[in-house]
Image (cartoon, helix red, strand yellow):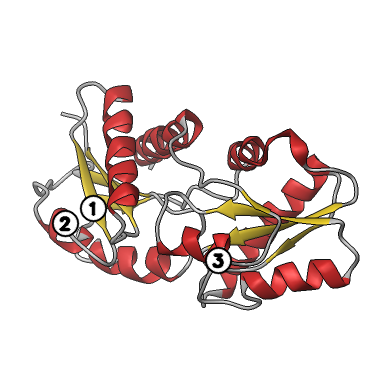
Amino acid sequence: MQPVLVVCAHGTRDPTGRATVADTVRAVAARLPGVEVREAYVDVHGPEVDTVVAGLPRFEEGLAGVVVPLLLAAGYHVRVDLAAAVRDRQDVVVTPALGPDDRLVDVVRDRLGPEVGPSDQVVLAPAGSSDERSQEDSRETGRRLEQRLRVPVRVAYAAGARPPVACGVTAARIDGAQRVVVASYLLAPGFFQRRLEGSGADAVSAPLLPDERVVALVVERYRSALGGASAG
């Protein structure tokens, strides 16, 4: 019996965002025939990850479950919430977050389209976190995106960290950008995406989902956890 895969997202009140995440979980399950895939969330709504993990069968040996964060950086939710959810379960592991990863940079680049010109500046806009390690993950993604685009890329946040995205847009204009494009580094539509759209940028890209490359990353995290458990 394969360990249960728990795909854990942040959660959103936006119905389109919730449907997008649910569709992604189903796409992950389609990639893993024979594996039970369960949906969980760390905030806003259920099913809560603590409850989902507590409902997994207990194994004396081997893995009962693998929690894969459907999150782009390893901030508070990964290091605190998910760690707490599995604290009493030696048979359940949490994998790293999805980013930084070059495949995510590819998705962001594709969402921007071909219109980013040499006189433009890009603001990469994650959700934001009070955890400095999460912010460094986002800055690393910004550096990789800048190398790909060959135009200046700065990082500003939808919430939870500074600078806020509107300030990032203003700073790019002060620097002389002809156009300022916000590159959404969010997974799904919702409140944060609307905040990006109200930042005053000339253009704002769509969130990363739906995209098969994100689905592939989740599947890869799950399979890597199984390999690590076997090696251990």
Chain-order first, disc 1 or disc 3: 1
Q: Is residue 6 left or right of residue 147?
A: left
Chain-order first, disc 2 or disc 3: 2
Residue at x 72%, y 67% (from the top left corner) = 169
Q: Is residue 116 left or right of residue 78?
A: right
- The residue where tag 2 is placed is 47
Q: Mark 2, mark 3: which one is toward the viewer?
A: 2
Pick the quarter of the image with the N terminus. Answer: top left
Disc number for residue 40: 1
Residue at x 34%, y 50% (from the top left corner) = 17
Dot 3: few (<14), some (14–19), or many (≥20) neighbours within 10 Å?
A: many
Classify 210 as above or below 174. Answer: above
Classify 146 as above or below 25. Answer: below
Disc 2 and disc 3: Cα gap in Å? 24 Å
Pick the quarter of the image with the C terminus. Answer: top left
Dot 2: few (<14), some (14–19), or many (≥20) neighbours within 10 Å?
A: some
Disc 1 and disc 2: Cα gap in Å? 5 Å
Are the residues flagged by discs 1 and 2 in contact, CB closer than 8 Å? yes
Judged from the image, the secondary structure of the residue bearing numbered disc 1 is: strand
Disc 1 and disc 3: Cα gap in Å? 21 Å
Dot 1: few (<14), some (14–19), or many (≥20) neighbours within 10 Å?
A: many
- The residue where tag 3 is placed is 134
Judged from the image, the secondary structure of the residue bearing numbered disc 2 is: loop
Disc number for residue 21: none
| Residue 182 seen in the figure | yes
Classify 225 as above or below 2. Answer: below
Check disc 1 and give the amino acid type. Ala
Q: Is residue 175 left or right of residue 198?
A: right
Q: Tell me where residue 125 sits by quadrant.
A: bottom right
Image spot of residue 93 (x, y percent): 31, 51
